């Protein structure tokens, strides 16, 4: 295994690239209302801006990891940056909403390339203090996700919605320039495209798309064709993946290890609840309370920023007691924040709402790190890579389901009554999450 002379420069180069996915997935939270007005959309239609990014991220990351092994991590990293740049150039000139959705999908594919390629380079060329390098890359991702709504809010207030795409260029240019000179040229592996489960990916995208269409149709009348597409796609996906040597999702492994499946379900629920607030509250602030985009972005720091303070405490508890206790604490805090949201009224002070958001945000610091460590407690070391990939897919599925739920709840009006209805649904999910946590094996 090789090493390089300036590992910090390698981490900086990769970090500037890998922050693009969380940044672009979080900035859209504040931009949805403005794009909804620009293209004369319902909230349900606009919610596709969220869903399509997570859908193609879920499909893209595992594929790009294998392509990185085949064609070299540096080549894939540079290619991913170019794809993000192309999408960011085209998006501001979108002649239609469907074209803009295509740009979001392309943006997701490009930014999904950067993480697996970057991880491959770190594990190969940083032989000392590798844990510290991975922690620094995690800071790039979590910081960009936390400050994404604030950055997006100020950009939209100053230069309108196209600016959230153009802001990618400073990061792309700097990362690409550094990558050319800093990243070592990795050797190409054996190009065996049969390893890519193309049919499985198509079935996965079709199945999730059918589910989204069905959920979004619930407000006006059930779309039975979408339900049929979802059911048929899920059945075919399961049958096909059982027979693959390298499946997109290892369904046999999920069947044989109930604890792992339980953790994935928990993580889907955690993200479903959290992203209901992450994407729902900015729409509420702008459309019901009439706050500007920059004020909305600042207020979102209460939700997105407080996890930074609770994550170290969660890590300490995990080291001392295992992952179950902090996961239970996070679930209870999330339940508390959700219950408090039901006390918010139109005449309540905005300070009270910010306190509620802070409580919900604190839960994220516990639940994210504890579910991840719980996963690693129940998988063999040799399966860590595939388990991590499916863990990310669970995050994306939770975000997709949250955008669909918001699309249904906010389809006619974005008001306090609808916000309370969402919180009531999330309250039930919180009790389910606590129940699943209690069943989880571990200390």
Image (cartoon, rainbow, N blue to C red):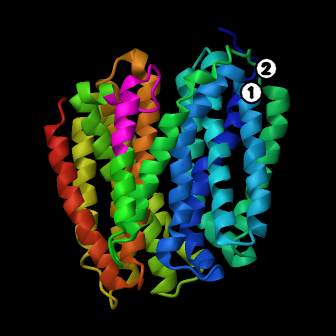
Q: Residue 60: where, in percent of width, then height?
A: 57, 40
Q: Main secondary structure of the magenta part?
A: helix
* Residue at image point 67% right, 20% down: 70
Position of residue 85 relative to residue 419, above or below, is above
Position of residue 261 relative to residue 431, above or below, is above
Q: Quadrant of residue 122?
A: top right
Q: Is residue 396 visible?
A: yes
- Start-end of magenta stretch: 234-251
Position of residue 64 relative to residue 305, above or below, is above
Q: Which residue is mark 2?
A: 185
Q: Which residue is mark 1?
A: 74
| Labelled disc at residue 5 | none
Question: Relative to 163, is 97 on the left or the right?
Answer: left
Q: Quadrant of residue 37?
A: bottom right
* Residue at image point 19% right, 29% down: 442
Q: Residue 71: where, in percent of width, then height?
A: 71, 22
* Residue at image point 78% right, 50% down: 85
**Which residue lies most toward the bottom here?**
347
Q: Which element carries disc 1, helix, strand or loop? A: helix
Q: Which element carries disc 2, helix, strand or loop? A: loop
Nearer to us in this view, 107 or 224: 224
Question: Relative to 362, is 100 on the left or the right?
Answer: right
């Amino acid at each position: 295994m090789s090493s390089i002379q300036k590992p910090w420069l390698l981490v900086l180069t990769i970090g500037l690239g890998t922050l693009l996915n969380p940044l672009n997935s979080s900035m859209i939270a504040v931009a949805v209302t403005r794009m909804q007005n620009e293209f004369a959309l319902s909230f349900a239609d606009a919610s596709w801006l969220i869903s399509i990014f997570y859908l193609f991220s879920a499909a893209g990351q595992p594929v790009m990891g294998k392509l990185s092994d085949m064609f070299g991590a540096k080549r894939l990293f540079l290619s991913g940056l170019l794809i993000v740049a192309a999408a960011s150039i085209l998006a501001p000139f979108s002649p239609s909403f469907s074209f803009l959705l295509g740009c979001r999908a392309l943006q997701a594919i490009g930014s999904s390339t950067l993480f697996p390629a970057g991880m491959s380079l770190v594990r190969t060329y940083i032989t000392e203090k590798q844990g510290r390098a991975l922690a620094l890359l995690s800071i790039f991702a979590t910081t960009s996700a936390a400050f994404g709504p604030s950055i997006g809010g100020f950009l939209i207030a100053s230069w309108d919605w196209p600016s959230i795409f153009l802001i990618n260029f400073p990061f792309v240019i700097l990362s690409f320039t550094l990558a050319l000179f800093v990243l070592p040229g990795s050797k190409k592996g054996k190009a065996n495209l049969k390893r890519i489960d193309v049919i499985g990916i198509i079935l996965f995208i079709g199945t999730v798309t059918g589910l989204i269409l069905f959920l979004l149709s619930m407000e006006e009348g059930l779309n039975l064709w979408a339900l049929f597409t979802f059911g048929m796609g899920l059945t075919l996906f399961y049958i096909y993946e059982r027979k693959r040597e390298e499946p997109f999702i290892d369904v046999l492994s999920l069947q044989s290890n109930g604890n792992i499946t339980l953790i994935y379900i928990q993580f889907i629920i955690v993200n479903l609840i959290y992203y209901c607030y992450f994407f729902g509250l900015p729409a509420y602030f702008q459309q019901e309370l009439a706050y500007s985009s920059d004020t909305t972005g600042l207020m979102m720091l209460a939700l997105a920023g407080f996890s930074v303070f609770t994550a170290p405490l969660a890590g300490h508890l995990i080291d001392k007691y295992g992952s179950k206790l902090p996961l239970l604490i996070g679930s209870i805090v999330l339940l508390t924040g959700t219950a408090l949201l039901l006390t918010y009224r139109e005449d309540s002070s905005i300070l009270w709402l910010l306190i509620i958001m802070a409580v919900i945000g604190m839960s994220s610091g516990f639940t994210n790190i504890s579910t991840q460590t719980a996963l690693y407690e129940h998988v063999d070391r040799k399966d860590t890579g595939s388990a991590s990939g499916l863990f990310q897919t669970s995050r994306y599925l939770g975000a997709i389901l949250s955008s669909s739920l918001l699309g249904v709840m906010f389809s006619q009006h974005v008001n306090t009554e609808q916000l309370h209805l969402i919180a009531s649904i999330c309250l039930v999910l919180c009790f389910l999450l606590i129940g699943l946590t209690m069943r989880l094996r571990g200390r």
